[in-house]
Every structure is written in C-alpha cells, then in structure tokens.
Image: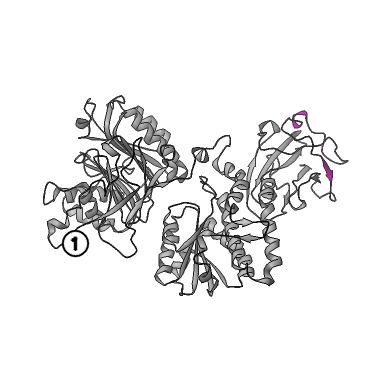
Amino acid sequence: MCIFAYLNYHVPRTRREILEVLIKGLRRLEYRGYDSAGVGIDGGNSKEWETNSKSIHLIKQTGKVKALDEEIHRQQDVDLDVEFDVHLGIAHTRWATHGVPSPVNSHPQRSDKNNEFIVIHNGIITNYKDLKKFLESKGYEFESETDTETIAKLVKYIYDNRESDDITFTTLVEQVTQQLEGAFALVLKSVHYPGEAVGSRRGGPLLIGVRSDHKLSTDHIPILYRSSGKDKKSCNTLPRMDEDTCLFPVDEKAVEYYFASDASAVIEHTNRVIFLEDDDIAAVRDGRLSIHRIKRTAGDHPARAIQTLQMELQQIMKGNFSSFMQKEIFEQPESVVNTMRGRVNFENNTVILGGLKDHIKEIQRCRRLIMIACGTSYHAGVATRQVLEELTELPVMVELASDFLDRNTPVFRDDVCFFISQSGETADSLLALRYCKGRGALTVGITNTVGSSISRETDCGVHINAGPEIGVASTKAYTSQFVALIMFALLMCDDRISMQPRRREIIQGLKVLPELSRIASKVILVICYNSKFDKFCVFVHMCILCTFTLVKCRHHRAPCACKCIRSGVCVQRGVDGLGQLSPSLLEVFIGPQVSAGAPPPLPPSFSSSCFLPQWSFRSTSKPMRSGMYWQPVTDVPPALQLTVHMKKC
C-alpha cells in the first residue's frame, strides 16, 4: 500500500497535468504490490479554482494503475482542461487487508456522500472496530469494510462537534491521531480547507518533497508544540507561523509539495525532501509547510531538516532489462564496489566504518552480538555468522524479528543488537529495535535507505550504498549487506595479531569480489537436443554468486543438469531457441568442435553474433550418464567457470 499526493501552490496546472503527476507517482510505486488504486481531486468544471475546490471527485478502480488511468479518461463529467492555480490531489495503491479488492474498499476513503473529508492511509488501525461501533452509535453509516473509513468518519465527527468555527485542519487531524491505535501513515484533503494538505505518520514511512524555483525561507523546519496551559482555548492554539517556523518560498512565490511513502515517487520531481518522524503532523496551508507535535518527549529533535536525495532517475528505471530484478542482478558488481568504496584500503589492509567510529570501543567490549532481521536480511545475518564468530570471538545470535519479540528474548546492557533492513522500515525489526533500546542495549543499523526509521533510531550504523532496489526479491542489497557485515568483522579484529593472516586473506577476497560477481552474473547456457522433435531447447540461468543450474527443457520434464560450484541464490529464465536470447545476456561461445557421441551439430542459428568468438570449449570430465559435460577455456577463475551441458533427451 502506497501513498502519493501532489499540491501545487501558485503553479498553474490543468486537471490533466495534475492527474498525470498522480498516475506517474503511483506507477513509480507499483513494485510495492497492490490490488486496486484510486485518486481524489477537486471537482467541478468552473474556470475559478476556488469554486471547484468546494467539491471533491473520487475515481477508484481495481487492478493495475493502467486500469485506473483508463477509468479516469472514461469520466464524462470531468473536464481535464480546467486549470488550477492551487490544488491538492491525492492518490493511493491498496493491498487488501480489511475487505476484498473493490472500488468501494479502495482509497481514498470518504467521510460521507458529499466527500467532505477524504483520506489515504497505509497501515492497520488496530482499534478500528471500537471506533466504528462508537461512530455507528452516533448515526454515521459505513459503506466499506476498511479500517481507513473510520479515520474519515472520525474527522467529520470531530468537525461536526467543534466548539468554534475557527478550528484548523491541523487541529482536527491532531485530535484524530490521538484516538488511533496501530501503525499508519496518512494524508487528508477536505472541501472545508481548500488547498490545504495534512499528513501524519506513526510506524509507517512518509516524506515530503519540496520543489520551487525560488529561495526557501529555511533549511530546517522547527517543530511546533501546543500550548501547555490549562485553558482549553489556549491548548488548541498553535504558535504563530512565520518565516522562523514555516517553510515557504521567499516573497510567497510558487511552490510544489509531494507527499509519498517512498522516495522513488518524488525523485523525478525534486531531490529535496523532509522525512517525517513518528507522531509528526505536517500541514501545508497557504503554501507554507509546518510540522507539529502534540507534546514533547525525551530525545525529540527540535527541527526537521531538508535533505538532498542521492538518487538519480535512471536508478529506478528498468532500461533495457526485462525486469527490475534482472537489472539489479547485473548491478551487483557496481553495488559491491559502492559498499566498500572509501572503507576498505587494499594497500594496507585496513577497514574504516565512519558510522561506527564513535562506538567501536564500546562494541569491542560487548559480550554478545545479536542480529535481528526479516526475510533476505535475516539470511544475510545467517550467511555471515560464522565469519563474525571467527573474527570477533564473540557469540553471535541471528534472530527473526517476529520470533524475537514473541519470545520476549532477554537482552542486556552489554549486548550489541544489529538491525538489518534494506528499506529501514521493516515493521517487526522496528518493534524489536525499540524493545532492545528499552533494555539499554547498543543498537546498530545496517540499512540501504537514508532517513529511514531504523537509520534514525539506532545509536550508530552502516549505510550499504547499494542504490535503490525496486525488485521485491532482494539481490544486490543482500550482497551489500553481506559485505557490510564482513567489513564490520574485519574492523573488530584489526588490532589482533593472531587474526592478521586471516584478515589479509578476507580483504584480498573482497578485492576480487566485484570481478567475481561480474563473472557470476553471466549466463549459464544449457542446450538439450530432443531427437523426437529434432529440436534444440535452450535454457538460461542467471546466477547471483554461483553457477548452480537446474534445467528442465520443454520436451524433457526431468532435470537435465545439476551442478553447484558455489553456494548462492539463482534466478531461472527459460527460452526456446537462440533467436530469443538477448545479446546482452548471452556471453558464451559454442565452438565448432563436437566430440564423439555428442548430439548432432548445432543448427546455424547457434552461430549468432552475440557469441564471443574468443571462447571455445573442451571436455574436462568423464562423460556423465546424461551426456557430455563441457567447460570454457578462458581466464575465468576455476571456481566460477561457466558450463555448457549438451545432452540427448
């Protein structure tokens, strides 16, 4: 489930342009998974934007974002050429939790049939049944099965029962969030507050991108708190919002704001973003952005800084690859180099991790290392545990975050807890982090996302610098997590004389790792000849860190070959005939020599220009039961040489 919202202030945009921005933002978030999508925009077709902002139009559809786009263009009562000087549009992709995928259950959810308040929401409201029961007792009717609708209805209930007409949108949302339990990130829009946006988060990621051609009033936005006086009226009064407390362009000029749950949705518009923290309430009013909190707590940062994203648009584009996962497999040599850049000195065999330098002595005095993660990040911990125990001479526990919490695992002040997460927002890992901090343990984050919750809440950490990972199955992030943990182990034993030979061996291994991963990312080609159909079947296996192959041809259901030279994870892709192989993927040359007993000569299509002519093959092993095993004659390290297995089916 993903959030995207766009507010243009004194930047004239037609409704068509606004919808294009919203749809494009959702498409950037499609990789997160969803089953339905929707948008909420100002209704009406008047030439005056103020008139149009007094109504809200919802368009929702199940299926892909493309289906939503088609539904938008089918709307007969929506003039796409109407221009807005000020406008807020909100959009959302939903993955069903409460209620089946359907337009009525899709977001935005509304407060009533007049769409007075609408909301988009990520997360789960755990007390929504109690809230729903209360609101139903007050006469509010529900039309969906979602927990999100209770938020919209609750906002309307508080607005309908307001004590004064000058209640602000921010105050409404503050009062609502105090009643919500669970994890959420949300953005609201209302006909009563045209051109205003309010967003809040607790446990779910939310950031705000800022775009303006003019100088901004500040680079740090101070946090505003409610008055602490006993007078009820004073408690609902916010501090004065001016150039010292708000972000806005100097001289009240044009500005655009982008609310999103992921930076990939805003990077094509701006690289200046503000990451909200838990219980922050961000409000845009009259083009000014302010951030509010209900009360002060220990450790609160006094301001939110505008950060510059170190991300480029091309990093989140597939380019010539068929999928993001394929692209990220082939990016591993570069990501491994980026993880080690400036940290490993191969000349004098030293390792420097700047994010840990202030705490390394404390870490070296600890009695136990605990690695806590989920999914692929958990496996990165398992894969490096042996080396960590060998080099640190400390007991190392690797825990699944959910299981770690369920067991109420004992944690002590002399433990060091590592939290490994590509996104830095993994819910179970975040809960485990707060559990460990509450027990006094030192916490270390291993993340790939600057400004993420884990990177902010841990005491220190290592940024793996793998670049954006769009594919759901982790590839380059896993490799970089592995390398980062190995670098930590090397740092821990840099002053131990007995460990120096082993350290040098591992560091030299890291030196050649980028080239090894580049070779291992090549294609393994398996050719099967089927005499019944007189046809060759070609299957391609792309490997991450190994040359493991398990091949099934279309005419031969049993595995044709199985060879594991190096442990790792592989991605299988099958095709029939060389004509369907991309030259960028195939880097294997089939030589003209075929030994006795091999299948018939290869058809002409096999001598394609995509082959590298300097490669040839010779037999390197005894004939297998299923055919002949061939190995390339190249300068490839023996442990990673590619294989061609020719066999009669």
Describe residue 608's horizontal placement relative to residue 488 as left or right.
right
User: What span is colored magenta in the figure?
Assistant: 592-619
Q: Any magenta on residue 593?
A: yes
Percent x, y of residue 235? 16, 58
Q: In the rendered image of this protein, does residue 16 appear above or below residue 225?
A: above
Q: Nearer the viewer, residue 274 or 370?
A: 274
Q: Quadrant of residue 552?
A: top right
Q: Name the magenta segment's main secondary structure.
A: loop
Tally the marks.
Answer: 1
- Examine the rendering and report whether any part of residue 475 can be seen: no
Q: Amino acid at mark 1?
A: Ser
Q: In the rendered image of this protein, does residue 558 appear above or below residue 249?
A: below
Q: Secondary structure at mark 1?
A: loop
**Which residue in the structure is indicated by mark 1?**
228
Describe residue 35's horizontal placement relative to residue 534 as left or right.
left
Q: Nearer the viewer, residue 18 or 37?
A: 18
Describe residue 206's horizontal placement relative to residue 237 as left or right.
right
- Residue located at (12% from left, 60% from top): 231
- Residue located at (76% from left, 46% from top): 643
